[in-house]
Image (tube, rainbow, N blue to C red):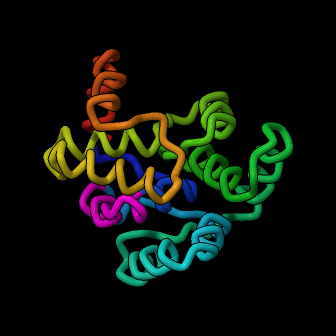
């Protein structure tokens, strides 16, 4: 079975750029990672993030999702019903309407996605996948976490072992993330 396409909100892009590991998204998700229009616009608010995102869009491994009128209407409903910002609502609606996995870090967005039947993980789930599949070493992951925290990115972990312990406590989730 082919891996599912993935929709993301701005946090994944920002975390991985600030962590110095944006290239890992290409390794893991080339040709199946989609950003909705508002997420791309939000990335543009931070020059260093926009530079990476614009290059990935230009190179074609990161894909800009063009939302249909029905998907835009769904995003409005998601924003209104769950109190999400526009980019997050678009990412949730996109994932729900197209059967994608969502990578998002905000609790309300994750809850909205789950209630709509969307499989969801966060940036740290992607970091877990990167290490467990050999795309990053544990030391590289720890360095990335340190860089993210230094750039004032909010993270619930201090080091990779915190991520691994959390995910490994649920073996089904660990397997799902490795195969994401």
**Numbered range of the magenta stretch:** 16-28
User: Residue 63 at x, y = what percent?
Assistant: 46, 69
Q: Residue placed at 63% from the left, 74% from the top?
A: 45
Q: Nearer the viewer, residue 87 or 51?
A: 51
Q: Residue placed at 41% from the left, 65% from the top?
A: 17
User: Residue 58 at x, y = what percent?
Assistant: 42, 84
User: Residue 175 at x, y = what percent?
Assistant: 26, 27
Left or right relative to 138: residue 56: right
Q: Nearer the viewer, residue 31 or 134?
A: 134
Above or below, 53 against 173 in this view is below
Q: Quadrant of residue 62?
A: bottom left
Above or below, 53 against 128 in this view is below
Left or right relative to 117: residue 15: left
Above or below, 119 against 169 in this view is below
Q: Is residue 18 visible?
A: yes
Asked if residue 26 lies in the magenta stretch, the reply is: yes
Q: Residue placed at 59% from the left, 70% from the top?
A: 40
Left or right relative to 64: residue 158: left
Q: Which quadrant would the N terminus be assigned to in this image?
A: top left
Above or below, 15 against 168 in this view is below
Q: Quadrant of residue 150?
A: bottom left
Q: Nearer the viewer, residue 7 or 129?
A: 129
Q: Residue placed at 47% from the left, 61% from the top?
A: 13
Magenta residues: mostly which secondary structure? helix
Left or right relative to 115: residue 154: left
């Amino acid at each position: 079975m082919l891996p599912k396409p993935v929709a993301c909100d701005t946090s994944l892009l920002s975390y991985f750029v600030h962590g110095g590991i944006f290239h890992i998204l290409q390794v893991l998700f080339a040709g199946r990672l989609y950003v909705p229009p508002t997420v791309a616009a939000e990335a543009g608010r931070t020059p260093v993030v926009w530079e990476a995102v614009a290059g990935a869009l230009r190179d074609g491994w990161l894909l800009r999702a063009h939302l249909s009128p029905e998907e835009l209407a769904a995003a409005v409903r998601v924003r209104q019903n769950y109190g999400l910002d526009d980019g997050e609502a678009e990412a949730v609606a996109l994932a729900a309407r197209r059967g994608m996995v969502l990578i998002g870090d905000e609790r309300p967005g994750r809850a909205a996605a789950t209630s709509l039947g969307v499989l969801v993980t966060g940036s740290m789930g992607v970091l877990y996948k990167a290490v467990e599949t050999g795309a990053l070493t544990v030391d590289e992951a720890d360095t990335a976490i340190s860089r993210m925290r230094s750039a004032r990115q909010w993270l619930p972990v201090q080091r990779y072992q915190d991520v691994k312990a959390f995910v490994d406590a649920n073996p089904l989730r660990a397997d799902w993330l490795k195969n994401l």
